[in-house]
Image (tube, grey):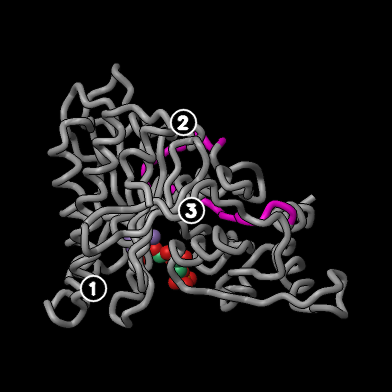
C-alpha cells in the first residue's frame, strides 16, 4: 500500500502543502492515541468552559484543539488558524502561505459513549495583504480550498482527503504510525435509499423539507415508490463517511427551534471541507438556496444549512424548494 507523501506527490501536490498536511496528521495521530485510551487517562467528560458557539467544551475538545493548534502553528507554513474552539483566528507567521480551519473534535457528544468522533480540516491560501491576526483572511469561499479532509477515530483511524484530484481514503497503520492509501478516487453512488437527519427536529423544519422527508417515510407505497432506511451517528464526520462509502443523503436543515440559531453546522470547518470531499467524489453539497462552496463567508463561525450526498437524491430534495 502506498504511503501518504508519495500518493500526494503523484497528485502533484506542492511540497510545502504536503508538509503542512503531515503536521496536521501528526496531531491527529496523537489525538487518535488519546481518544483510544478512553477511560484510562481521565480525558472523558466536560470542562467548566463554554466555546464561542455556546457549547460546553468536552475535555477532549480542548486537548485536541491545543494539539492541532500548536503543531500547525509550529510548522512555519501557516499564517493563521481558526477553530471551532477559538473565538478568533490565531496568528502564525506573517509569511505563512496557508490558512487552516478545523473542527478539532467533531461529534464530541460521542466521546463519553466510546462512539464515533473525528477531526475535520480545511486549507486555503493566505492572502498576502492582510495581517496574520485578521479574521477577514478566512472569508474565502469553499471553492478556494486547496485541501480538505477528516480523520475518523473509529475501529480503525481513517483519513479522507482531497487536494482537488479526487477524494482518497487512507488508514492509519498504528504499527508504523503512517497513513496508507487504501482507496483512490472514491465515488459516491448517484442514487440511494438511505437518509441521515436528526428526526427529532422535524416539526421545526421548513415546509419543503417536511414534505421531502414525509415522502421518504412513506416508502414503497408513497410517491417515491421505494423504502428508505435512516441512520444518524450524531457526528457529521461519521455520517459523511458512510455517505462517501455507500451513498446517502445527509442533511441538517434550517429549523425554527431556536430563533437565534436557524442552522447548526459551521461553514468553514464542517460544511465546506465535507462539500469539497463529496464533490470530488461525484456527490453534491448544497443548501436549499445554492451550492455550499459558492457561499462568500461573512464570519469565521458562520452556520449554514446542509443538504449533501448522492447527486440524484440531493437534486430530488432541492426540487421540493422550487
Ligand atoms: P461538534 O461536536 O463539533 O460540536 O459538532 C456536532 C455536530 C455534528 O457533528 C453533528 O452532525 C451534529 O452536531 C449533531 O447534532 P444533534 O445534536 O442534533 O444530533
Ligand atoms: Mn462543538
Ligand atoms: Mn463538528
Ligand atoms: Mn467539534
Q: Which residue is mark 3?
A: 183
- Toward the viewer: 243 or 73? 243
Name the element at disc 2: helix
Locate residue 26, reporting x and y percent: 20, 50
Classify 10 Å Cα crowding around label 1: few (below 14), some (14-19), many (20 and above).
some
Closer to the chain start, of discs 3 and 1, is 1
Name the element at disc 3: strand
- Toward the viewer: 41 or 137? 41
Q: Is residue 56 left or right of residue 115?
A: left
Locate residue 54, reporting x and y percent: 32, 62
Can residue 252 be seen in the rendering of this structure? no
Residue plotted at (21% across, 57% down): 177
**Residue at mark 2: C-beta within 8 A of ligand 3:** no
Name the element at disc 1: helix
Q: CA distance from mark 2 to mark 1?
A: 34 Å
**Residue at mark 3: C-beta within 8 A of ligand 1:** no
Going by the picture, which residue comes out furthest to the front? 1
Locate residue 206, reporting x and y percent: 67, 62
Q: Which residue is mark 2?
A: 144
Residue plotted at (28% across, 28% down): 15
Q: Which residue is mark 1?
A: 36
Looking at the image, residue 229 lies above or below residue 306: below
User: In this picture, which residue range is highlighted in magenta?
Assistant: 294-312
2 and 1 marks in contact (CB < 8 Å) = no
Query: Which mark identifies residue 73?
Result: none
Amino acid at each position: 500500500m502506498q504511503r501518504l507523501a508519495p500518493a500526494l506527490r503523484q497528485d502533484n501536490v506542492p511540497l510545502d502543502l504536503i508538509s503542512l498536511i503531515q503536521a496536521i496528521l501528526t496531531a491527529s495521530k496523537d489525538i487518535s492515541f488519546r481518544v483510544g485510551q478512553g477511560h484510562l487517562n481521565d480525558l472523558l467528560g466536560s470542562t467548566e468552559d463554554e466555546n464561542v458557539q455556546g457549547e460546553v467544551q468536552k475535555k477532549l475538545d480542548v486537548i485536541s484543539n491545543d494539539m492541532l493548534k500548536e503543531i500547525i502553528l509550529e510548522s512555519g507554513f501557516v499564517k493563521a488558524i481558526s477553530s471551532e474552539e477559538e473565538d478568533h483566528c490565531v496568528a502564525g507567521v506573517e509569511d505563512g502561505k496557508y490558512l487552516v480551519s478545523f473542527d478539532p473534535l467533531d461529534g464530541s457528544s460521542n466521546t463519553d459513549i466510546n462512539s464515533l468522533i473525528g477531526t475535520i480540516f480545511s486549507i486555503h491560501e493566505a492572502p498576502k495583504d492582510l495581517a496574520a491576526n485578521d479574521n477577514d483572511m478566512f472569508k474565502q469561499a469553499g471553492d478556494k480550498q486547496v485541501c480538505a479532509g477528516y480523520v475518523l477515530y473509529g475501529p480503525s483511524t481513517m483519513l479522507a482527503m482531497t487536494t482537488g484530484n479526487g477524494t482518497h481514503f487512507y488508514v492509519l497503520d498504528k504499527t508504523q504510525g503512517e497513513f496508507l492509501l487504501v482507496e483512490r478516487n472514491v465515488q459516491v453512488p448517484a442514487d440511494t435509499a438511505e437518509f441521515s437527519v436528526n428526526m427529532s427536529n422535524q416539526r421545526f423544519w421548513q415546509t419543503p423539507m417536511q414534505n421531502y422527508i414525509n415522502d421518504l417515510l412513506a416508502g414503497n407505497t408513497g410517491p417515491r415508490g421505494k423504502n428508505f432506511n435512516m441512520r444518524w451517528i450524531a457526528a457529521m464526520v461519521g455520517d459523511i463517511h458512510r455517505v462517501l462509502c455507500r451513498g446517502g443523503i445527509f442533511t441538517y436543515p434550517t429549523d425554527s427551534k431556536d430563533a437565534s440559531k436557524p442552522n447548526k453546522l459551521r461553514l468553514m470547518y464542517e460544511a465546506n471541507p465535507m462539500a469539497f470531499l463529496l464533490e470530488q467524489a461525484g456527490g453534491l453539497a448544497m443548501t436549499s438556496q445554492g451550492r455550499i462552496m459558492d457561499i462568500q463567508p461573512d464570519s469565521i463561525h458562520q452556520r449554514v444549512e446542509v443538504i449533501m450526498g448522492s447527486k440524484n437524491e440531493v437534486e430530488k430534495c432541492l426540487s421540493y424548494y422550487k
